[in-house]
Image: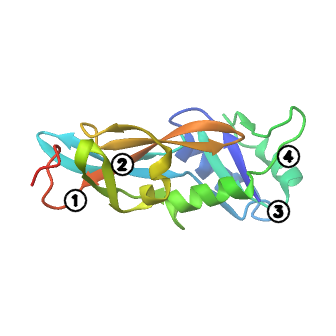
Amino acid sequence: MWYVIQTLFGEEERTAGMIREQVSSCYVEECFVSKRERMKKFHGSWNKVEEILFRGYVFVISKEPEGLYQELKKVPKLTKMLGREKAFFCPLSEKEEQMIQRIGGKDCKTVLSKIELGEGKQIRVIEGPLKNYVGDVVKVNLHKREVVVRVEFMGKSVDVFMGVEMAEGMNGLGEK
């Protein structure tokens, strides 16, 4: 089962590293931070950068949540193991796990989606993880080369920022 660990913004990688080092492997099958690629402009040219997809969260796969919970007390700066009820932690639902895997692949890293603009500035996804979420897009920001998708995560609607790049031969206005 997948569990979500809440930590401080900017401390995700450090926390995941501490969990991997300090928590027994019998309680942690895998520990990771979900990431995304996006395009960012530096000195007039677009560059691919990597950022945290779910800021403030670390994911742990475990079959022993009670033992995991006790072992996590060894990790400094750890906020809490999240759940939907006050005194009990819950794994992510199967649907939430699948969503993270669909947008991030087996490495849980969301790659850029290639898009082009159609009539009325409608985006058309050529390839990439955004293809599965076109109907969930709530905002398109071509200036920043990102799209906001609304998904269900931990029982509530969350906006996820996904990076896009224009298909070959297209400029930001959809013109060749």
Q: Label 1 amino acid?
A: Ala
> Would residue 108 be visible to someone looking at this image?
no
Q: Which residue is mark 4?
A: 70
Spatial separation of the CA atoms under disc 4 and disc 3: 14 Å
Residue 36 coordinates in the image, percent (x, y) = 43, 51
> Would residue 80 be visible to someone looking at this image?
yes
Q: Secondary structure at mark 1?
A: loop
Does label 1 or label 3 sit earlier along the sequence?
3
What quarter of the picture does the N terminus occupy? Answer: bottom right
- The front one of 41 and 27 is 41
Q: Which residue is mark 1?
A: 167
Residue 163 coordinates in the image, percent (x, y) = 36, 48
Q: Residue furthest front?
A: 119
Q: Secondary structure at mark 3?
A: loop
Spatial separation of the CA atoms under disc 2 and disc 4: 37 Å
- Given this view, does label 3 or label 2 mark the residue nearer the observer? 2
What quarter of the picture does the C terminus occupy? Answer: bottom left
Spatial separation of the CA atoms under disc 1 and disc 3: 42 Å
Residue drawn at the location 38% of the way across and 43% of the way down: 147
Spatial separation of the CA atoms under disc 2 and disc 1: 13 Å
- The label on residue 63 is 3
Residue drawn at the location 64% of the way across and 44% of the way down: 152
Residue 171 placement, left or right of 114: left
Q: Is residue 170 above or below residue 51?
A: below
- Residue 142, by quadrant, is top left
Q: Label 3 amino acid?
A: Lys
Residue 119 placement, left or right of 44: right
Q: Which residue is mark 2?
A: 163
- Given this view, does label 4 or label 3 mark the residue nearer the observer? 3
Q: Are marks 3 and 2 in contact (CB under 8 Å)?
A: no
